[in-house]
Image: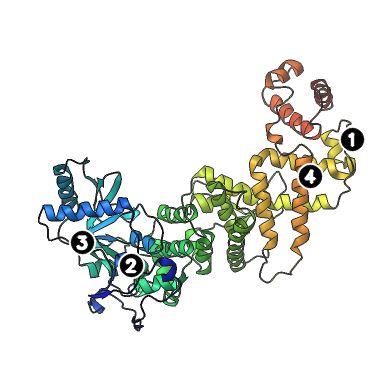
């Protein structure tokens, strides 16, 4: 093993400079399988020159070393994967995964507990997490605690895949085999607890981390065919750490065998879990979604259904019938990348809520499908956006409804903003206006616009502001092959609409209480059943137009309307 002993190298230097002045560039060759690779010694580096351990981590590793000494174990203890990557990046990490080389994880955890107990330290029962291939738990994992930290421990392993499954056959392996089975070289490095070193068995992990490159230890095509979910994982890491994708990976990701494997080997739930992890994590998660579309995988992860424009009470503008599937794919890429940038530059303080940021990114990605609908597997009519989320990635229905509301309402808000810009802004009279008068164009058309806007805001409630944000992003996004237009005017129109809503008592219209409740209506007008609902709806529309009117004025209008009906 080669030991680098050069001067201190914090990660700020690692990402900006070379790893070692004497480190030679080795020609990278893609190996199809592990049997093609000649087992060589790893690159080994003094950990203290690359990472900084917290006091808590120092204490944990000291306990692990002492436990080995206490029981006379000839065991090499390594921390694997993400913790090493994160520490090299100068980030904190609570995810300590231990790999041992000569016993099962449960046995090692029990021996550590035995040592801690002998020292008079608190211990807890070792828990064993059973295999769960759908959550990438291919081997039972033991969990124990050192102080307040939970630690997972397993033995080093190798994997062999069958052609029809992404669930491998697990065997006890060497650290070299364990490193090469991992998804990316940057996730295949170890911290050797025994001698305080960083081990890079692929000899590319550190260099790829420096170059910010996502590359598989073995040939990308075979790696992705074996486990197609690694495409999503790689895109997630790429978005989180701003990594470039290796050219070989990009070629493999569009291979038909990989697409077929992704469609047949990976469950819908796993698609959803990876996407949610990305959306809830740091970095630029919108670029994971755009990556799916760039590789033509969006139709696998978010399968659409044959659909037609639905009938919406808001008269939402119909989707552009001229958009082909390819144009929608390109539009999805541009929309979600534009939304990611827009959130970073314009809305840092506006959308601090994680759930809303997730909804806006998904809404921008699926925006090209607004207005389209189809039938679910249960033969129920739904919007295509809702089904792509709930059926495609098993997204929670409530969250999918939020995304769907944003997608369906933003084009309508844009059309109302354009309509408002063409009307004269005259002071509104205090006289009573009926819905019929508004529809017939009273007050120069402003009353009808107020009625339409009030109806929409009553339905979408607090989502109206993020829906305007989505509308802004949509007009900022160019559609390939379409005529270019000046988006600045539409941005002004949307901002003017938002101001008009706030100045005209519509910004929280859904909270307005009725002047007559259902019991009042039954008593006053002698109606029941469906007739009560009709009067309730008519009162809502009248109140949208007359927010400052009295109960008596409302009663008089409803009485007259009932007589006319």
Q: Which residue is mark 3?
A: 194
- The answer to whether residue 552 is above or below residue 87 is above
Q: Would you say 457 lies left or right of 440 here?
A: left
Q: Residue furthest front?
A: 7
Q: Residues within 10 Å of mark 1 (few under 14, many from 20)?
A: few
State the residue at coordinates (34%, 79%): 30
Q: Residues within 10 Å of mark 4 (few under 14, many from 20)?
A: some
Disc 3 to disc 4, C-alpha distance: 67 Å
Disc 2 to disc 3, C-alpha distance: 16 Å
Q: Which residue is mark 1?
A: 429
Answer whether labels 4 and 1 touch (C-beta < 8 Å): no
Query: SS of the residue at dot 2?
Result: helix
Disc 3 to disc 1, C-alpha distance: 82 Å
**Where, by quadrant of the figure, is residue 69 drawn?**
bottom left
Residue 55 appears at what percent x and percent y?
Answer: 31, 52
In primary-sequence order, the first of circles 2 and 3 is 2
In primary-sequence order, the first of circles 4 and 1 is 1
Answer whether labels 3 and 4 touch (C-beta < 8 Å): no
Q: Which residue is mark 2?
A: 49
In primary-sequence order, the first of circles 4 and 2 is 2
- The answer to whether residue 368 is above or below residue 408 is below
Residue 510 appears at what percent x and percent y?
Answer: 68, 35
Answer whether labels 3 and 1 touch (C-beta < 8 Å): no
- The answer to whether residue 560 is above or below residue 94 is above
Query: SS of the residue at dot 3?
Result: loop
Query: SS of the residue at dot 4?
Result: helix
In primary-sequence order, the first of circles 3 and 4 is 3
Which residue is at the front of the view, 165 or 32? 32
- Residue 500's mark? 4
Which residue is at the front of the view, 483 or 359? 359
Q: Nearer the viewer, mark 4 or mark 2?
A: 2
């Amino acid at each position: 093993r080669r030991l680098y002993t050069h001067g201190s190298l914090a990660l700020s230097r690692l990402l900006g400079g070379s790893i070692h002045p004497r480190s030679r560039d080795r020609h990278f060759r893609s190996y199809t399988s592990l049997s093609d690779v000649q087992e060589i010694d790893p690159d080994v580096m003094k950990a203290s020159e690359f990472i900084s351990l917290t006091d808590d981590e120092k204490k944990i590793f000291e306990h692990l070393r002492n436990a080995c000494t206490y029981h006379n174990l000839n065991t090499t203890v390594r921390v694997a994967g993400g913790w090493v990557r994160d520490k090299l990046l100068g980030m904190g990490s609570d995810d300590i995964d231990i790999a041992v080389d000569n016993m099962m994880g449960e046995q090692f955890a029990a021996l550590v507990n035995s040592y801690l107990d002998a020292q008079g330290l608190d211990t807890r029962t070792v828990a064993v997490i059973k295999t769960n291939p759908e959550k990438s738990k291919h081997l039972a994992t033991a969990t124990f605690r050192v102080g307040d930290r939970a630690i997972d421990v397993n033995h080093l392993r190798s994997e062999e895949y069958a052609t029809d499954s992404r669930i491998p056959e697990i065997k006890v392996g060497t650290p070299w085999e364990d490193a090469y089975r991992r998804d990316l070289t940057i996730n295949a490095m170890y911290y050797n607890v025994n001698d305080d070193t960083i081990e890079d068995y692929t000899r590319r992990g550190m260099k790829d981390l420096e170059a910010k490159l996502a590359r598989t230890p073995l040939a990308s095509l075979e790696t992705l065919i074996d486990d197609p979910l690694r495409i999503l994982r790689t895109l997630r890491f790429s978005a989180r750490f701003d990594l470039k994708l290796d050219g070989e990976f990009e070629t493999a990701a569009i291979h038909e065998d990989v697409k077929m494997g992704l469609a047949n080997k990976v469950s819908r739930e796993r698609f959803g879990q990876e996407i949610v992890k990305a959306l809830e994590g740091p970095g630029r998660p919108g670029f994971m979604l755009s990556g799916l579309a760039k590789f033509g995988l969006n139709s696998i992860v978010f399968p659409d259904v044959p659909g037609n424009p639905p009938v919406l009470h808001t008269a939402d503008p119909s989707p552009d019938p001229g958009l082909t599937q390819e144009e929608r794919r390109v539009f999805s890429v541009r929309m979600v990348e534009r939304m990611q940038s827009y959130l970073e530059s314009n809305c840092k303080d506006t959308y601090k809520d994680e759930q809303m940021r997730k909804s806006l990114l998904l809404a921008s990605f699926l925006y090209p499908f607004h207005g389209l609908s189809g039938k679910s597997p249960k033969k129920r009519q739904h919007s295509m956006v809702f089904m792509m989320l709930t059926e495609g990635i098993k997204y929670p229905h409530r969250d999918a409804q939020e995304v769907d509301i944003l997608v369906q309402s933003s084009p309508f808000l844009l059309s109302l903003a354009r309509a408002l810009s063409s009307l004269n802004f005259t002071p509104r009279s205090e006289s009573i206006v009926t819905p019929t008068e508004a529809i017939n164009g009273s007050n120069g058309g402003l009353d009808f616009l107020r009625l339409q806007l009030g109806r929409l805001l009553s339905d979408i409630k607090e989502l109206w502001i993020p829906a305007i944000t989505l509308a802004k992003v949509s007009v900022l996004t160019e559609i390939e092959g379409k005529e270019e237009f000046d988006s600045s005017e539409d941005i002004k129109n949307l901002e003017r609409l938002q101001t008009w809503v706030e100045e005209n008592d519509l910004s929280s219209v859904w909270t307005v209480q009725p002047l007559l409740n259902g019991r009042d209506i039954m008593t006053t007008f002698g109606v029941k059943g469906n007739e009560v609902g009709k009067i309730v709806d008519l009162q809502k529309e009248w109140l949208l137009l007359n927010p400052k009117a009295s109960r008596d004025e409302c009663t008089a209008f409803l009485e007259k309307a009932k007589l006319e009906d």
